[in-house]
Image (cartoon, rainbow, N blue to C red):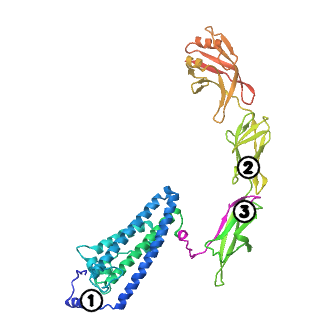
Amino acid sequence: MAQSNARLSPRQKMINLMYIVLTAMLALNVSSDVLDGFMQVEDGLARTNVTVNRRNAAIYSELKNLAADDPTAMNAWMSKADSVRSASARLYSLIDSLKLAIVREADGAGGTIDDIQNRDDMEAASVIMLEPATMRGSALRAEVDRFRTTVEKIVVDPTRRASVNSALSTQPFQRKGMLVAQSWEEAKFDRQPAVAAITLLTKLQNDIRYAEGEALLSIAALSQGKSIAEITGSEMIANELNAFVVPESKMVIRGGRYSADIVLAAVDTASRPTIYVGGRPIANGHYEFVAGSSGNFNYSGHIEVPHPDGSVTKHPFTSSYTVIDPYATVSATMMNVLYAGIDNPISISVPGMPQSAVQASMTNGTLTRNGDLWTARPANIGTDAAITVTAEVEGRRQNIATHTFRVRKLPDPTPYLAIGTDRYKGGKPIGKQAVAGAGGLKAAIDDGLLDIQFQVLSFEMIVFDSMGNAIPEVSAGAAFSERQKEAIKRLGRGKRFFISRIKAKGPDGVERTLSPMEILIN
């Protein structure tokens, strides 16, 4: 028995002693009817344990089947399930051994749980469970605590976790009239008839099987991304009903259809609700109409839900939608205008429409498509090019927008010498070997928006002799002629020469004369 450290008066000590003697006298006279009742409860709990264990085995079997279909995804979950099953089996077996020990303490070495002779033995449970030398009661409490902690980490539902905690609680218990609380094992087994102790241990086994089942259900639900209600097939009892409007889109192009589903959460399929929008009922909860004008619009309604008692409740809802005029975005990705005679990359899109539903055409040139990319090639300089975009809306083709671009001639390129990866455009000192290594003249537009190469057709190089006379040397193409190369070799440090009368042709086919270059030899 637990002792109190509080100082008691002689009178109080006498009262406590009398209470203990009375309790012992009552315990020594436990009626056979009460003992028979314990046996009936024990039998019922044993049958329940078999049923619960069968259910747990079915859940575990389903987990094994899932693991066989997808081992990679289920390995971690199966590891948890195996851990819970193993811990439950060990604890269940430990309790079986304690039950047998109590029976044999009461009936002798040949005693069996199925046929307890000395059911009213008041010492057997205390000897087995509370013996200070073995401390088997406190050891059992520690094992129950360990198992409860394992299960609580797996069970995610707070209500189910609280139930597990309550079923496997080992908190100290304070009986009415006692000054201090008893430990869990003392409250359960101190001076209990053998049959009562056996029944309490069977009840504990039942709680262990229950906790194991809760853990396996949580593992099954989490591994499949479902709720426990879906796993068990149970129905959820709704305590709140809400109306919801689920539109396909709150933004509608004029001429298109607004479409929405109006639903009520937790509808009883045996008593379907009636849905009203603007005072008129709609069929199957599907609300649809053709948007005739642009702007922001609101609508409202209610859902009438009949109940078994004949009453009807109304659940209002409101929603809104926006109707926009058709529009499209058309932009030249390479520049702000279109240049005649070349391919101009174009981006065309209609918000809310898939690219497969979008088409476009162009005046003053051709517009071609490659997947989601477009290329515009204007024909005549000075004549605007109009790109018209259409899209298929509700099964019919509709004009979305037209964008107009000015068409310009490609600007003149800049001549340059290719010095490695650099483009030397004159005006700065440069080594004679670098000039000779360039091999000839090139031209391109590289203003940050365009990077278009031109073909150099011819150019003239002008050098000066020692008398200051200008000596022109003409090239018939983009490369330096032999005479031009010889002239470059004769140039001394600090000398300069000019490249002029540069003829070049771009991808638009237009031939043009470029500005001259001044080259200073370093």
Instruction: Return the disc, 2 or 1, that comes first in the chain's sequence.
Output: 1
The answer to whether 365 is drawn above or below residue 121 in the figure is: above
Residue highlighted by disc 1: 24
**SS under mark 1:** helix
To which quarter of the image does residue 115 belong? bottom left
* Residue 188 image-quadrant placement: bottom left
Mark 2–mark 1 Cα distance, whole angstroms, equals 94 Å
The answer to whether any part of residue 456 appears in the image is yes
Q: Nearer the viewer, residue 69 or 17?
A: 69
State how far apart marks 2 and 3 are (Cα).
Answer: 20 Å
Q: Residue visible at 46% across and 74% down?
A: 52
Q: Magenta stretch?
A: 229-256
Tell me which amino acid carries mark 3: Tyr
Residue in the image at 67% along x and 39% along y = 334
What numbered label is drawn on residue 358? 2
Let me know if residue 181 appears in the view. Answer: no
Q: Give the image location of residue 98, x and y in percent.
A: 31, 75
- The image quarter containing residue 285 is bottom right
Rate crowding at label 1 as few (under 14), some (14 to 19) or many (20 or more) other CA atoms within 10 Å.
few
Q: Quadrant of the C terminus?
A: top right
Residue position marked by numbered label 3 in the rendering: 258
Looking at the picture, which amino acid does disc 2 mark? Val
Q: Picture coordinates of residue 206 (x, y %)? A: 41, 76
Q: Nearer the viewer, residue 368 or 149?
A: 149
Q: Is residue 251 left or right of residue 88?
A: right
Q: Position of residue 106 (x, y in %)?
A: 28, 82
The spot of residue 463 in percent (x, y) is: 64, 13
Q: Are marks 3 and 1 in contact (CB under 8 Å)?
A: no
User: Label 3's element?
Assistant: strand
